[in-house]
């Protein structure tokens, strides 16, 4: 067994599935393999840019990533943006493939992680959970203050956007309005969301909490489309 050496600074990405109970008990009650695939999708796989470890807590998944870029030639904003691009891809895949909304947080802080005994704890994990459960609310990934400060002026080069309530989040739509193929993905997402909203509205007792989350997502797509249309006219 590895001896604990003390806290290490890491980047944590906390994923949470919205409506997980309904997925297990209703939507995929006879398809546990589908639930497994959904959970596995929320794993940022190690790449040439960063290495990643993962730990599962029921419907939540935590990815543990080194706080510093793998290569000295990488600056931090590029490094973090690569991670956020993968988060955006996962968000898109979850909604478009499984019809599932996810939310979460990204934090920079201290943890203890022991892979051999599947143990994870520390201030960073507590912060990540608090941001996801108390602040995120909508299907968005909140970027905590330490990371915003570390990005500094480079924040404009990343997928971070300040939302209506003042919190910074990973803006999925910054990368979905750049080329024609991406616009097609955006349109498909919009149709899926509108279908979900219509289904909820047609139910006997619409879940207003769930409905507000789909409306938030749809509103972001509409805003992205309007921004793109304005930039073309200008």
Image (cartoon, rainbow, N blue to C red):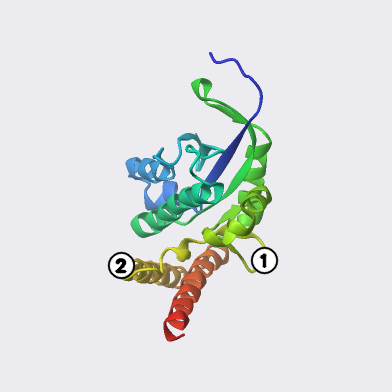
Residue 127 figure quarter? top right
Vertical side of 31 occupied by 89: above or below = below
Mark seen at residue 32 = none
Q: Which residue is mark 2?
A: 181
Q: Position of residue 143 (x, y in %)?
A: 60, 53
Q: Residue at x 55, y 67 (%)?
A: 212
**Residue under label 1:** 165
Q: Residue at x 67, y 48 (%)?
A: 146
191 or 92, which lies in front?
Answer: 92
Decide which of 76, 174 is in the foreground and name it. Answer: 76
First in residue order: circle 1 vs circle 2: 1
- In the depicted structure, whether residue 196 falls above or below residue 14: below
Q: Residue 49, position in %: x, y?
A: 43, 42
Location of residue 135 by image quarter: bottom right
Q: Is residue 137 visible?
A: no
Q: Secondary structure at mark 2?
A: helix
Drawn side of residue 77 relative to residue 126, left or right: left
Q: Say what secondary structure mark 1 lies in.
A: loop
Q: In this orientation, which residue lies closer to the viewer: 147 or 136?
A: 147
Residue 165 drawn at (x, y percent):
67, 66
Q: Residue at x 51, y 40 (%)?
A: 69
User: How far, Cα to Cα, is label 1 from label 2?
Assistant: 31 Å
- At horizontal 46% and vertical 65% (from top left) the residue drawn is 173
Label 1 neighbour load within 10 Å: few <14, some 14-19, many 20+: few
Q: Residue furthest front?
A: 73
């Amino acid at each position: 067994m590895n001896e604990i050496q003390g806290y290490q600074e890491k980047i944590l990405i906390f994923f949470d599935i919205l409506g997980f109970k309904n997925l297990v008990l209703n939507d995929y009650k006879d398809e546990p393999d589908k639930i497994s695939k959904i959970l596995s999708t929320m794993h940022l796989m190690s790449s040439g840019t960063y290495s990643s470890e993962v730990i599962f807590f029921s419907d939540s998944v935590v990815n543990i990533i080194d706080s510093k870029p793998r290569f000295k030639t990488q600056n931090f904003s590029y490094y973090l943006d690569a991670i956020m691009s993968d988060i955006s891809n996962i968000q898109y895949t979850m909604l478009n493939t499984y019809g599932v909304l996810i939310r979460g947080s990204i934090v920079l802080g201290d943890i203890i992680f022991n892979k051999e005994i599947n143990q994870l704890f520390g201030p960073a994990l507590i912060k990540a959970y608090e941001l996801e459960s108390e602040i995120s609310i909508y299907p968005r990934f909140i970027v905590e203050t330490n990371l915003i400060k570390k990005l500094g002026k480079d924040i404009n080069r990343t997928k971070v956007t300040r939302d209506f309530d003042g919190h910074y989040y990973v803006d999925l739509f910054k990368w979905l309005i750049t080329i024609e193929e991406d616009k097609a993905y955006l349109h498909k997402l919009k149709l899926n969301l509108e279908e979900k909203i219509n289904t909820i509205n047609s139910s006997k007792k619409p879940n207003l909490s769930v409905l507000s989350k789909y409306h938030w997502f749809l509103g972001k797509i509409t805003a992205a489309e309007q921004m793109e249309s304005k930039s073309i006219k200008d």
